[in-house]
Image: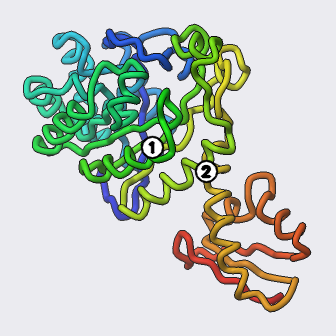
Amino acid sequence: MVFMQSTLTYSNIPIFIPELACPHQCVFCDQAKIIGLNTIPKPNEISKIVETNLTTMDENRIIDIAFFGGSFTGIPFELQEEYLKEAFSFIKANRISGIRLSTRPDYIDVQRLELLKKYGVTTIELGAQSTNDNVLIKSGRGHSFKDIQNASKLILDYGFKLGLQMMIGLPGDTFETAMQTANDIIELGANNTRIYPTLVIKGTALEKLYNNGIYQPLSLEVAVNWSKEILRTFEKNNITILRVGLHPSEELVDGKSLIAGPFHPSFKEMVMTEIWNDIILGNLNQAKSKNLIIKVNSKQLNYAVGYKGKNKNQLLAKGIKVKFVGDSSFEKYQINVSNN
């Protein structure tokens, strides 16, 4: 397989290893319920998982094997190597391009990075969650901002791409501390990030805090607005945003495990709707009539119209009839408002 980045898209083959290594029970965490998976694949099952996924992917992709859901580098060294050997065989056969994994900042050191480098790992994502020490303590993270700084520098020094995941609405979090986390992620040299709203999951310490009135999750509206500002900050600094909002697993969608918090299966679409709402309202001064054509990038068309037509309906409520048109030649947030 020839990997030509100019024409290919990116895909992950996710392999979830929930709670396998992590001794810290963060107040918000039950990975198995969050990702909807309760079984841990053995190293000798990796090949079958990858083969099954590869049959669904065409060759016009850059494909990574991704070990997610736990703290991979906290696994016993020998077991890490077993998983990595299985994945690395697909790199040697030119069937995938690399391996990415997620782990904790305090599970990064020279010995671990040497092992990851040996077996073709290309990207390491750290669950930073917050860079505010007060928030980290209240969330039971078991590491400090200094640990995030040290791990990030070491990862970059070894030539890996750095991902830094963040959560909004953790205990003690505010809009100001969340924005500081976003700015710290940029300053630390992250290549990519994920933005997750904090949810109250059944059986977690956060559920007890919530039931006792000590913790209150963000409302959906507030979480969307925080994420809007954070997302734009990342985009302005060329940080790749891999995900906004949690994957809508069965455990979350059917409400079995979700106690409270700003979960929505279309969370990203709602965030993008608000971004486009700001853009559209900021350009209405171009309008000379109550009958308009709004032209935007084709891939942004649904977001511009809005989740469940929110932006279009908002204009209609102002007495403005609008036709949205997609144009593939437009830049991502380019807009043209003209009279119909």
Residue 71: image location, x then y, percent: 32, 20
Count of numbered circles in the view? 2
Residue 143: image location, x then y, percent: 27, 23
- Of 41 and 228, which appears nearest the observer? 228
| Mark 2 secondary-structure assignment | helix
Residue 238, above or below 248: below
Tell me how the rendering is colored: rainbow
Estimate the spatial distance between the alpha carbons at disc 1 and disc 2, rounded to whole Å.
Answer: 12 Å
Q: Tell me what residue is drawn at x 47 percent, y 27 percent.
A: 52
Picture disc at residue 178: 1
Q: Mark 1 or mark 2: which comes first in sequence?
A: 1
Q: Tell me what residue is drawn at x 43 percent, y 22 percent.
A: 139
Q: Is residue 106 left or right of residue 193?
A: left
Q: Is residue 34 left or right of residue 124?
A: right
| Mark 1 secondary-structure assignment | helix
Amino acid marked by disc 2? Asn
Amino acid marked by disc 1? Ala
Residue designated by label 2: 225
Residue 163, above or below 323: above
Q: Tell me what residue is drawn at x 54 percent, y 16 percent.
A: 206
